[in-house]
Image (cartoon, rainbow, N blue to C red):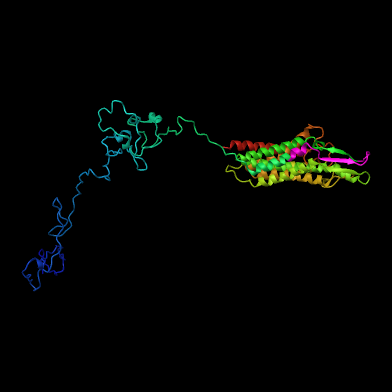
């Protein structure tokens, strides 16, 4: 069997010539009743026939050359006829997109307001419903039989209303490609929304501050100690003592601490973290104030007990004494509860230099009342001087008051948070009033922080105490001003 083009011998099962590549035309034996012809070698010429070539296209173009069998270049595809029923055919480049549905309404030129005016970034199409379509003119649409209806519009934004018609162009279109103009305000024509602060709600700290405040007020105006001797001539003081009998500035100091404590708790109920610190600092100041008062109340009791071998007496610690003691204990509870709220309020911290200077001023204010004066010894801070019998509770009261002041000042300032600032201010309120009234002699017999310096003659606070308390208040005010500036 030979190729009909080049004459090269081929086998019956071959479809193409190995030399020229021509397609071999075999004839199937079933096409004729005559036996197949024999080739030069005696083999059959035709044994079977391969499938027919694919039909030519309507333009008469074949995929393979019928002679050589080579692949022919194909012409570009003929554009399809427009399909009126097609719904997924994309428009040609530059052709306007009709987003109104299947109506005959012709939209305006999409390029009159920029390319892609009818397109949204999300791929959807929408068009603002013009005000004239909501209120059609009485004479109709100038003979337009197929005027657009509201149902023909798709994806109409619900926020479009009549008051924005001034921002629309001809035909009810916005200037930006499918975007609301920058002058759009959702509250236009209405009241502007108000940025509300944190909501007020009652917190447990408020309830904890009310009880010691009430106890302190009761203790201020009731009898604290009552001593009645068994005979008229007694070598010790007798009678009844109220709070102001131990120091004429103690009542106002206690009132300031109680009010500050409650106000701080109210601020914390309003969501201000500095209020929790202020309530805790005032609670600590109230506890130091209370134990100092109890130490002073023990002085006449201690004198009556020392002369009991000579003259007997009846000593009564009255309701004021126990109310002040309860106020001091509950003040410590307020401080401990407040420390649980010493967290970050999400704002920037306070200035560390101001905080460091405030802590140093606190240390000076605490050490000031412990400095001995007039050749007094340092050990008189914890022991009685010669010829006197100072009750132990008074020494304890002095150190507790100064220790709580140290805690509130140093820890509060170095915390560098608004809570710590409130803690430092609340802890300084009572001590500051005692220093002010004692240094300026505003009352008859005021007392300073920790009662007085060892060996003092006039009872005025030492200069170190005055400067320390003054600097504490000053740096607290500076830190407060900086916190208000950074509030935004």
Q: Is residue 226 magenta?
A: yes
Against 459, residue 46 (above or below) is: below
Which quarter shows the N terminus? bottom left
Q: Name the outermost residue toward the left.
A: 34
Left or right of residue 223: residue 160 = left
Q: Residue at x 25, y 28 (%)?
A: 143
Using the rendered image of the protein, determine whether residue 218 is visible from the camera's viewpoint: yes
Instruction: From the viewer's side, name the closer residue of 139 and 463.
Output: 139
- 361 left or right of 319 in image: left
Tell me the quarter of the picture where residue 481 sits. Answer: top right
Q: Write the start and end of the magenta stretch as one range.
A: 215-235
Of 440 and 136, the residue lying toward us: 136
Q: Residue 139 sits in which quadrant?
A: top left
The residue most toward the bottom is 42
Image position, residue 453 (x, y; %) = 81, 41
Residue 292 in the image: above or below residue 2: above
* Total numbered labels: 0
The reply to whether residue 356 is visible in this rendering is: no
The residue at 77%/34% (across/down) is 437
Q: For residue 368: magenta? A: no
Question: Residue 136 location in percent, x, y?
Answer: 32, 28
Image position, residue 222 (x, y; %): 79, 37
Percent coordinates x, y for residue 425 in the rendering? 68, 39
| Quarter holding residue 473 | top right
Viewer-closest of 110 and 476: 110
Quadrant showing the C terminus: top right
């Amino acid at each position: 069997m030979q190729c009909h083009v080049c004459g090269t011998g081929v086998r019956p099962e071959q479809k193409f010539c190995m030399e020229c590549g021509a397609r071999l035309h075999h004839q199937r034996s079933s096409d004729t009743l005559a036996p197949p012809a024999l080739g030069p070698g005696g083999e059959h010429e035709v044994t079977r026939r391969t499938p027919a070539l694919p039909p030519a296209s309507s333009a008469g173009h074949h995929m393979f050359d019928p002679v050589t069998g080579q692949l022919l270049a194909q012409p570009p595809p003929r554009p399809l006829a427009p399909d009126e029923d097609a719904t997924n055919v994309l428009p040609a480049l530059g052709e306007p997109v009709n987003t109104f549905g299947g109506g005959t309404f012709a939209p305006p030129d999409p390029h009159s307001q920029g390319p892609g005016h009818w397109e949204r970034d999300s791929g959807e199409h929408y068009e603002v419903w013009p005000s004239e379509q909501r209120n059609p003119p009485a004479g109709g649409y100038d003979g337009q039989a197929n005027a657009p209806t509201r149902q023909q519009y798709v994806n109409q934004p619900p926020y479009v209303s009549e008051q924005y018609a001034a921002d629309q162009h001809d035909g009810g279109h916005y200037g930006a490609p499918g975007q609301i103009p920058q002058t759009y305000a959702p509250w236009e024509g209405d009241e502007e929304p108000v940025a509300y602060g944190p909501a007020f709600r009652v917190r447990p700290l408020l309830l904890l501050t009310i009880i010691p405040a009430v106890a302190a007020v009761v203790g201020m105006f009731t009898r604290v100690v009552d001593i009645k001797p068994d005979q008229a001539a007694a070598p010790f003081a007798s009678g009844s003592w109220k709070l102001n009998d131990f120091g004429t500035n103690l009542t106002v100091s206690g009132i300031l601490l109680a009010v500050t404590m409650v106000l701080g708790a109210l601020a914390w109920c309003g969501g201000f973290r500095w209020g929790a610190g202020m309530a805790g600092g005032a609670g600590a100041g109230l506890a130091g104030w209370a134990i100092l008062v109890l130490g002073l109340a023990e002085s006449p009791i201690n004198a009556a007990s020392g002369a009991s071998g000579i003259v007997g007496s009846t000593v009564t610690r009255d309701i004021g004494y126990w109310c002040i003691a309860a106020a001091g204990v509950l003040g410590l509870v307020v401080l401990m509860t407040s420390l649980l709220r010493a967290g970050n309020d999400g704002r920037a911290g306070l200035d560390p230099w101001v905080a460091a200077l405030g802590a140093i001023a606190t240390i000076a204010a605490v050490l000031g009342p412990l400095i001995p004066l007039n050749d007094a010894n340092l050990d008189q801070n914890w022991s009685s001087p010669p010829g006197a019998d100072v009750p132990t509770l008074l020494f304890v009261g002095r150190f507790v008051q100064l220790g709580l002041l140290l805690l509130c000042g140093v820890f509060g300032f170095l915390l560098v948070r608004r809570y710590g600032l409130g803690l430092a201010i609340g802890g300084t309120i009572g001590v500051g009033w005692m220093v002010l009234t004692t240094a300026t002699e505003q009352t008859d017999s005021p007392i300073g922080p920790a009662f007085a310096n060892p060996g003092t003659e006039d009872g005025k606070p030492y200069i170190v105490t005055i400067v320390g308390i003054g600097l504490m208040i000053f740096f607290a005010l500076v830190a407060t001003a900086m916190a208000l500036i950074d509030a935004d």
